[in-house]
Amino acid sequence: MNMQRVSTLVFVLGLCAACTPPLTERERDVGLGYLIGSGVGAGVGAATGNPALGAIAGGPVGAVTGWGWASWRERDRQIADLQAQLAAQQHEVDLLREGMRRLGRSEWLEP
């Protein structure tokens, strides 16, 4: 390939990347996991004599790990949200109970 074709290809790929929506946290974590897994796999592969095979094997393992990490963080966030909703509802129930107790004492039970 000549230099003009390469620069045109890089320009077109840059435009395509600029027009995409931002990555979700899960997509970002999967991509980072793939890159880290490929790097670690290449390091292990270099120690055994075949870095390319190590990178090819390590990438998907890293991607799955990144996906699991993103799922774990999302689940923790959902649990925290549910706990906050539960606390707010418990507070509302306590306020309603107190109101009913006061109403019962002031109007129904006391003459």
Image: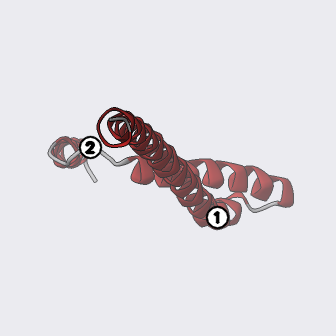
Q: Could you say where residue 26 lies in the image, as x and y percent from the top left?
A: 43, 53
Tell me the element at label 1: helix
Q: Could you say where residue 27 lies in the image, as x and y percent from the top left?
A: 40, 53
Q: Could you say where residue 106 lies in the image, as x and y percent from the top left?
A: 33, 32
Residue 110: image quadrant is top left
Tell me the element at label 2: loop
Query: Which residue of the protein is positioned furthest toward the front in this rendering?
Result: 111
Q: Which mark is residue 22?
A: 2
Direction from residue 83 to residue 107 in the image, left or right:
left
Residue at x 26%, y 43% (from the top left corner): 22
Task: Work out whether 63 lies above or below 35.
Answer: below
Residue at x 38%, y 41% (from the top left corner): 109
Front-most of 13 and 5? 13
Task: Work out whether 37 lies above or below 84.
Answer: below
Task: Work out whether 38 lies above or below 19.
Answer: below
Q: Which mark is residue 39?
A: none
Residue at x 52%, y 57% (from the top left corner): 71
Direction from residue 52 to residue 28 in the image, left or right:
left
| Circle 2 residues within 10 Å: few <14, some 14–19, many ≥20 | few
**Which of pointers 1 and 2 lies earlier in the amino acid sequence?**
2
Q: Amino acid at mark 1?
A: Val
Please identify the quadrant where the N terminus is shown.
Answer: bottom left
